[in-house]
Image (cartoon, grey):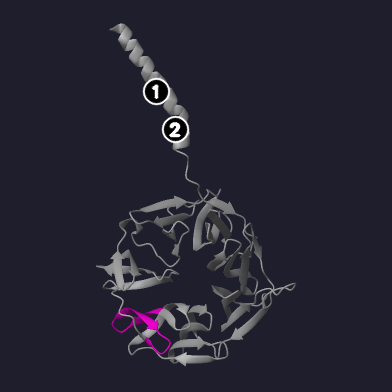
Amino acid sequence: MNRLRAVFVCLLTACAAVLSTVSPAAAAPTPGWSTVPVPAAGPPAYVSDIAARRPGEAWATGSEGTADGQRPLLYRWDGRAWSRDTTFPGADEPGSLRKVQFVGEEVWIFRNRAGAGEILRRSAASPGGAATWSVVPLPHTLWTYQDFTAVPGAAWVVGEDSTGLKVLRYDGSGWTSQTTPEGVLFLMGITARSATDAWAWADTTSGTVVLRWDGTAWRDAKVPLPRDGNVHTMLLEPSGRITLGGSQYTDGVSRTYLMTRIGNTWRTTFPAALADAHTEGMVRGPDGALWLPLRSDRAFQSKYARVGPARVTFSYGPERENAIEVAARALTSTGTALLSFGTVEIYGSRPNLMSERLGG
């Protein structure tokens, strides 16, 4: 009996030794977020948007602090590193850069230039030549500029002036002012797939609604939004799928919802793990899941959520020494990786820029 027991113990020990040699490979760690250096800006720095159209081209916008107030910031990603671009007209004048859009091979950026709105256009580089910048001014100055979108053949700017809501459309040669359905108070955001297919989310006398431009008029798109809900963002995906994110308020408590339209059917979910997270920075990642930056519960690390078909998981950016707030403000997919842009505040300093990458 003792001999059998000894043989059994030896077998267990041998099995444990074999498992210990293969377990590290079987439990290889998932690649995490890595730090991407960003040329410093004048603090406090603010981030507006980030967008990419290929692995070797992304743009990030915002503003930096100067003795004369905020000044526009523009950075370009070439697939390896961020560099600052100061070649656009009025780069040293007060103001800020906002949303980035790609129109063919051009880059279009909305700019608030000391209160006046305009579109910066960067042409594609000609053979043997460099890309050039030009400016498309708005027909008049608005009190507020809520949002901007551009596609081949059209661009929209929405905001308000002393007369109320303004929806301005640019067709390549000039601007027209568009009307919205009765009861619309203002537009909170806008996006477009083509010159005849644009979507906007609006505050109305009866609550939040989604509007659609069909090339002729803006109409209620009849999207079945959750009761007492609002909209943060809308993704018009190349496949034809539409993904919408927002919040619903019930008894004074906010909870995040996601809606997806495939064909003509809308499906709504309330991921409990997202709680009341804001979905404005949500993007579709290279892995097919939805990703969004979150307000982190760790002062020294940024935080991201991955919303997959079955569950929500979370990941954190690299630890930053002496950081009191690390905030990823915007995300984009470069086709092979996720690239974030945001701010980091180190103890004793004011917010400056940071960037992180996952994959690629």
Determine crowd level at label 2: few under 14, some 14-19, many 20+ residues with C-alpha closer than 10 A.
few
Q: Is residue 350 visible?
A: no
The residue positioned farthest toward the left in the image shown: 251
Q: Is residue 137 magenta?
A: no
- Horizontal side of 180 relative to 131 (left or right) equals left
Instruction: Tell which of 344 and 17 is nearer to you.
Output: 17
Residue type marked 1: Cys
Residue at position x 59%, y 67% in the image? 59
- In this view, 163 is above or below 51: below
Query: Which residues are drawn in magenta?
Result: 200-218
Give the labeled residue for mark 1. 15
- In this view, 273 is above or below 213: above
* SS at mark 1 in the image: helix
Instruction: Tell which of 7 and 322 is nearer to you.
Output: 7
Instruction: Tell which of 169 and 189 is nearer to you.
Output: 169
Q: Main secondary structure of the magenta part?
A: strand
Q: Is residue 73 visible?
A: yes
Residue at position x 38%, y 88% in the image? 180
**In the image, residue 223 lies at what x, y percent?**
31, 76
The alpha-carbon separation of the residues under discs 2 and 1 comes to 12 Å
Residue at position x 49%, y 83% in the image? 156
**In the image, residue 170 lies at what x, y percent?**
53, 87
Instruction: Tell which of 257 and 198 is nearer to you.
Output: 198
The answer to which image quadrant residue 271 occupies is: bottom left
Determine crowd level at label 1: few under 14, some 14-19, many 20+ residues with C-alpha closer than 10 A.
few
Q: Earlier in the sequence, mark 2 or mark 1?
A: 1
**In the image, residue 111 lies at what x, y percent?**
57, 78
Give the labeled residue for mark 2. 23
Q: Which mark is residue 214?
A: none
Residue type marked 2: Ser
Q: Is residue 206 magenta?
A: yes
